[in-house]
């Protein structure tokens, strides 16, 4: 198979703005140093889509609140050096870990979500090349064919509604082998084709990011072909080929690690050089509900896999950030950076600036760090999940540095 392979670590650092040139009215202050810092705008190229230039492993499967890979890349290039340890305790779909891998950094990632575990591990530990991945897929498909026929009565009705019964049987058998063997890469490819309205996907016509059936727009009597059996094999193999279409050249290291853990229970590495992470959005995204179909295939025995107050209750969110800040204070190397990408919640009457809360918590719990600058980025519509909801419209990128003499 033809693959466009790119050499790693060749990108030129593009300096991010660090002086206050924006006319943004927002002023932030950290209480311990009493400095007020105005946000600056991001470089204009951050607005460009990276879909046609990024490593295609980034596109294994969608994830709500996913960071743009070009932003992750710039932050890693500007705030860490090759060989240094970059960590992301809210790894999500693994954007920061994958870019860190491509850029020759060491990495450590964690997240509470089992979906994040599959995506992050699939991206940082993929089979070396497309032929290896296709061979593995053929092996697992053969094992799956030998399994006894699944009893669809054991599948909840809300899951059955998405699939032709024969497609569902293929899907159930394949997912159970992936779970048994810990095949994160194949599972990620499978989850990436689970639901959509296009023919390369497994479900009846449905949305891609968050699972909703589109049977009103595509009623079965008008579009019967969209309700036919969709065999898994050709779709999975095509998905694997797409995943390797533009693969950056990196070799996974046995020292890289992903831990499925909530931040409160997470043991950070003894020392690290740089933390780059986007903490969960407050009140705008619900990772459990919005990933429900994928989470069901990851573990059908979990009724509500990520019922997590951090995304709903401000107190729980503050506790989680305080926990992270204390660990950063203890383990971040001197002169190391801590970069937090914070989604701001906006509604009709007011904007709650979580960054303000985060700055206050950081100054209390991580007093040896200084806030150097804030980049204010507008999130384009395409990255919001639902229309007419309390949307996250801007994100602030807070850049902290641990001082030499702290
Ligand atoms: C904004 S997303 C991260 C997105 C990621 N940067 C990406 O590009 O895909 C925030 C993540 O925080 C995770 N999360 C929520 N509460 C958590 C907690 N208490 N501990 C650890 N992770 C948590 C969610 O599962 C979600 O993946």
Image (cartoon, rainbow, N blue to C red):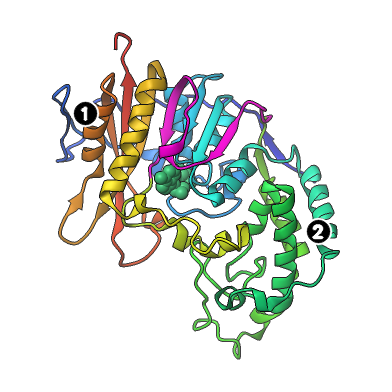
Q: Residue at x 37, y 57 (%)?
A: 381
Callout 2: few (<14), some (14-19), or many (20+) C-alpha neighbours within 10 Å?
Answer: many
Mark 2 lies on residue: 141
Q: Earlier in the sequence, mark 2 or mark 1?
A: 1
Answer with the quarter of the image where residue 301 lies. Answer: bottom right
- Which percent across, then down, holds residue 156? 59, 75
Residue 20: give its label: 1
Q: Return the mark for residue 50.
A: none
Category of crowding for the residue at label 1, using alpha-carbon neighbours closer than 10 angstroms: few (below 14), some (14–19), many (at least 20): some
Q: Which residues are magenta?
A: 251-279
Q: What is the distance, in whole Å, between disc 2 and disc 1 at their CAs?
A: 56 Å
Look at 78% across and 52% down and name the residue there.
137
Q: Name above or below for residue 40 compared with residue 274.
A: below
> Looking at the image, do the residues carrying marks 2 and 1 touch, with CB atoms under 8 Å apart?
no
Would residue 31 appear left or right of 170 to someone viewing this image?
A: left
Foreground residue among 143 and 355: 143
Residue 43 seen in render: no
Give the foreground label among 2 and 1: 2
- The residue sitting at 75% across, 72% down in the picture is 150
Query: Does 272 appear in magenta?
Result: yes
Q: Is residue 150 visible?
A: yes
Q: Is residue 394 magenta?
A: no
């Amino acid at each position: 198979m033809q693959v466009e392979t790119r050499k790693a670590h060749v990108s030129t650092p593009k300096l991010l703005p660090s002086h206050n040139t924006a006319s943004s009215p927002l002023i932030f202050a950290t209480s311990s140093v009493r400095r007020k810092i105005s946000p600056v705008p991001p470089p204009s190229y951050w607005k460009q889509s990276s879909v046609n230039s990024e490593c295609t492993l980034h596109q294994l499967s969608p994830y709500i609140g996913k960071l743009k890979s070009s932003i992750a890349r710039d932050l890693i290039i500007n705030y860490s050096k090759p060989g240094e340890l970059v960590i992301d305790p809210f790894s999500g779909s693994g954007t920061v870990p994958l870019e860190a891998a491509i850029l020759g950094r060491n990495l450590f990632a964690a997240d509470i979500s089992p979906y994040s575990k599959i995506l992050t591990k699939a991206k940082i530990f993929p089979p070396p090349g497309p032929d290896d991945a296709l061979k593995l897929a053929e092996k697992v498909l053969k094992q799956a064919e030998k399994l006894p026929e699944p009893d669809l009565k054991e599948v909840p009705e809300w899951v059955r509604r998405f699939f032709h019964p024969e497609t569902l049987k293929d899907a159930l058998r394949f997912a159970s082998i992936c779970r048994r063997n810990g095949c994160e890469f194949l599972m990620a490819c499978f989850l990436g084709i689970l639901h959509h309205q296009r023919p390369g996907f497994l479900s009846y016509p449905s949305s891609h990011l968050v699972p909703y059936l589109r049977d009103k727009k595509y009623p079965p009597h008008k579009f019967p072909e969209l309700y036919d059996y969709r065999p898994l094999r050709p779709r999975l193999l095509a998905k694997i080929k797409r995943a390797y279409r533009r693969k950056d050249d990196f070799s996974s290291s046995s020292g890289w690690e992903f831990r499925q853990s909530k931040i409160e229970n997470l043991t950070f590495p003894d020392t690290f050089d740089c933390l780059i992470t986007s903490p969960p959005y407050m009140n705008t995204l619900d990772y459990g509900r919005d990933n429900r179909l994928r989470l069901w295939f990851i573990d059908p025995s979990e009724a509500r896999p990520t019922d997590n107050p951090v995304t709903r209750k401000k107190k729980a969110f503050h506790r989680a950030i305080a926990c992270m800040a204390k660990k950063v204070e203890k383990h971040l190397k001197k002169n190391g950076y801590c970069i937090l990408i914070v989604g701001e919640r906006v509604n009709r009457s007011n904007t709650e600036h979580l960054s303000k809360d985060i700055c206050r918590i950081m100054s209390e719990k991580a007093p040896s760090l200084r806030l150097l600058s804030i980049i204010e980025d507008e999130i384009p519509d395409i990255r919001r999940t639902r229309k007419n909801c309390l949307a996250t419209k801007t994100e602030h990128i807070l850049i902290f540095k641990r001082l030499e003499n702290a």
